[in-house]
Image (spheres, coloured by chain):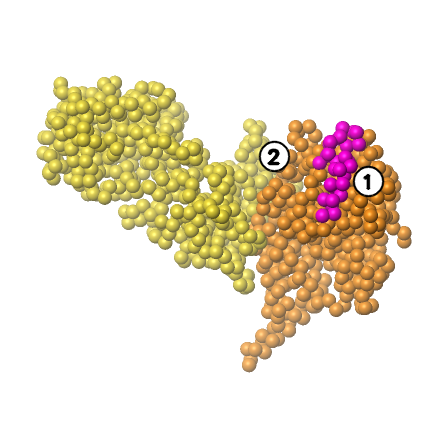
Chain colours: A orange, B yellow
Amino acid sequence: MKHLKILTANVHHDDQIELDAYERRGGYQAIRKVLKMDPAEVTAEVKASGLRGRGGAGFPTGVKWGFVPKNTGKPIYLLNNADESEPGTFKDRLLMERDPHLVIEGMMIAAWALGANWCCAYIRGEYSFPALMQQRAVDQAYEKGYLGKNIFGSGFDLDIVVHRGAGAYICGEETGLIESLEGNKGQPRIKPPFPAVVGLYGCPTVVNNTETLAALPWIMLNGASSYNSIGTEKSTGTKLFSASGHIKKPGVYEVNMGYPILDFINNECGGMRGDKALKAVITGGSSVPVLRADELEGVTLDYESCMEAGTFVGSGGFIVMDETTDMVEACLNLQHFYSHESCGQCTPCREGAHWVEKIVGRIYHGGGSSSDLSLIGDVTKQIAGHTICPFGDALVVPVQSFYKKFPEEFNERIDSALVSQIGNTHV
Amino acid sequence: MSESKELVTVTVDGTAVQVPKGTNLIEVARKAGVEIPHYCYHPNLSIAGNCRMCQVQVEGMPKLTIACNTGATDGMVVRTQKVSEDVAEAQRATLEFLLINHPLDCTVCDQAGHCKLQDYYYEYNGRASRFVENKVNKIKAEPVGPEVIYDGERCIVCTRCVRFCEEVTETSEFGVFNRGDKSVIGIHPGAELDNPFSGVVVDLCPVGALTHRRWRFNTRIWYTQEVNTVCTGCSTGCNAKVAVRDGKIVQVKARLNEDVNKEWMCDEGRYGFDRFQPKHRVVGPIVSGMDSDWTSAVNSSKALLGGEEPAAVLLSPFLTLEEVWVAMMFARDVMGLDAASGNIAMQLRRRDLSKLEQILVSPDYAPNARAAQLFGLCGNEESWREAVERHYESVLKQISSGSAKRILLVGEGAVAEADCDAALVKGLRSASVSLALCASHPESDPVAAACSVVLPGRTVHEKNGVMLNRDARLQRLRMLLQGPIGTQPEWMLLANLASGLGKKILPAEVTDDRGLFRAMTGSLESLSGATLVRIGDSGIELEEAAGGKDGSSDPAAV
């Protein structure tokens, strides 16, 4: 299958990071076109394209823009969420490192559509090189007059600030990002109000994922209908998947939505490393349920099919596990990540995330008991949906799906633990 | 919390109530008679939504929602823990979560007995914990300021203290440090919790994480008697709940009153609650510096009776409203003075306040000074405080200049400590009679020492009555401590003295403070609508106390 290259068409050119090269390959044409359009037309076009947020939630981008109230007398802010911290996800990094001007042009288009004159790229703290490249590109754009006052003679002003986070996963949640950007502790806010109404410094704010923004120039140049002709009905266009794990060719791949998972593993990823048997796949970052190998038949990489299979496209962090993987250990690894990253603001997540990790850890280390799995079930049920932000829902996903899909591995650990304990008492 | 005046109808567990649109569901439920448990919510702080205890089910919403951050809309149907098993289960879980890393050291915790973790756990969970792992160790017994100490393990990170210091005092000493289950409250580097309202954070803390350094480990709360009274530190009249044990004040909490002090209280008032108890007490009449008896005291006071000699009366601002009323009658019927004579005044010295103190504290030390205005001692000026002070200075001068020959000082604090100079002592000594009704023994009080007759009075914490605060609000002052044997409240001393001198100022049936209150409200038109029941724990405006208003002058209601 031939995949359209919308986001990664030029990433293999080493000089793509330079403004001139970017422009020579057709860059900064979409924004020139857009600046002649009415902002409402741009929003309508994005809506028509069916583009959905690529950060994980998959919310339609045009609809999100539509929530911003007009004429409040307050400035509108656009934030580029490049706090890419979901385990297994490294797609935005490629864009920032290899094609930073594409991201800038995307931000410019969104800013024009929203009426924003100030935009911030909030980049994950650990991403020092991507931030460097993004900053370099922004500097080039300023130098050339593509950012700042009166862009392309249109009268439109836009400032872009590159900001690096301080290394907290939760700052990728949009209100956590806003809090962090304001200089506060990175903790999500309670909603309502939503950022579209009360966001950065109390002003209407739109937070879009980097990949979402990078898709905008192509959509505006080629039209919504070209974009939504790719993919499926509800999942249009292409999506970046960052493949990792027990495969021959880990990396970032752009595929058309609707592409079969097994084809993706066998073709793009080059098949299983060492030709071992496939055991499980996490399709969209650690916060989506894991799929067993036997569940993959017929599942395609798009929002509908993944949901039908009981998982999500998520952020596109595609993690492949082969038969040698210890699922209890893998689960413990992920739960450790979540308990480490829990911001500690609200009760169920602050206490529950660590509790779950401790239970899984106990099972892994041979101290499990037969009631532990039902306890995990109870505890995770009371975390999900009861927290301030979606982190609570995310943290229960690995453990819930791992022990439900691989119960024999968990039970084996628990049983052997019981045997050894009984044995001890008799000695 | 209401955003508009528009009324909407909300159904809580089947009970329909009308509330202003946007009122949060905790308040809505309260109105419907349902208590929604909560930790982080406080009516006078911003919404944090972090404790997750107040979850309710709102029809049409896919998930449970927190009541504190949900505004009432018309037709909303709310189900609480009383009818929804989902809500009850979520609250049960929240409590289990809160307690997994809690040290459960209730046996040595000052908060035990008035702890929301204990209360809610008994009410909404009551099951054994399933947590068998090791608990997280956090900072313990960390002083955060001169008055407050912090225990990180007991803390549930509700951030009420953080928000209080950010939003009310705007001093921002507190912050939340670390993440996840290591989260603790802490003081920013170089800072100290030393603002004038630091003790409030202990009241706000729903658990035992913040406690008073000076009252730590002093008693279990269930061995105390908790009395709802008002603070007598200044004329603000902050509502307080005072715990008393074995004749000692062992803890003071601010009490919620939206019209007076929200739930705040200054440290000076709270920690100085027992400063009104002199160490050395008068316990019997003293005449010319010698322990004496009542008959000699009456005989020595005869010169007070109306005559040609100029007279001066100073009233303490720590007297109750009833006592001021009795003193005014005494001055009129015994001494022949009336309010307009310019010879009666109430002690008041203004003081300077820092900008921060001004959010609550009044620039005086005179809890009942507004009574002076009610009884016509300072005219009807807008700036009553200045007027009371001016009159006080004038009467003080009458005494120190030696012109007043019949002098009556009613109550502990009738003369401010700083005003007791040689001239005043000389004036008191040169009078035909100078009578002091006070609590301090002459040996430790130069004013009493200069008076020819001293009668054993009570301190402000040893009597029941009503007080009039700076905003002309009637509030109940309740007896916290028993007066020593031999002492009497000032009104009783005055009434007995008057009858000893052949004058009757109170009807015979007035034998206790309730009877006295009834007699006062019966004779003053401006108070004829007031009953102790109406004043209750939160007080009423003086305007509401005037006669005729929803006419509860039924004596049985007193």
Using residue A254 as the reference point, say whether residue B437 is left or right of it: left
Which disc number belongs to residue A286? none
Q: Chain of mark 1?
A: A
Q: Position of residue A119 (x, y in %)?
A: 70, 38
In the rendered image, residue A413 lying in the magenta stretch gets the answer: no
Q: Camera-side residue: B219 or A54?
A: A54
Instruction: Kindly state the secondary structure of the residue where label 2 is placed.
Output: loop
Q: Chain of mark 2?
A: B
Give the distance between the C-alpha atoms of the residues marked 2 and 1, in whole angstroms. 42 Å
Q: Which residues are magenta?
A: A132-159
Residue type highlighted by circle 2: Thr
Estimate how packed mark 2 is, as few (under 14), some (14 to 19) or many (20 or more) residues with alpha carbons within 10 Å. Answer: some
Q: Camera-side residue: B377 or A381?
A: B377
Instruction: Kindly state the secondary structure of the residue where label 1 is placed.
Output: helix
Q: Which residue is mark 1?
A: A217
Q: Are marks 2 and 1 on the same chain?
A: no
Using residue A244 as the reference point, say whether residue B321 is left or right of it: left
Using residue A81 as the reference point, say whether residue A202 is left or right of it: left
Q: Is residue B337 above or below residue A12?
A: above
Q: Position of residue B535 (x, y in %)?
A: 37, 32
Using residue A53 as the reference point, say whether residue B12 is left or right of it: left
Q: Which residue is mark 2?
A: B73
| Foreground: disc 2 or disc 1 | 1
Q: Position of residue B231 (x, y in %)?
A: 35, 37
Q: Position of residue B489 (x, y in %)?
A: 23, 36
Q: Residue at x 67, y 32 (%)?
A: A75
Q: Camera-side residue: B218 or B467?
A: B218
Query: Which residue ends up furthest to the bottom in the rendered image?
Result: A427
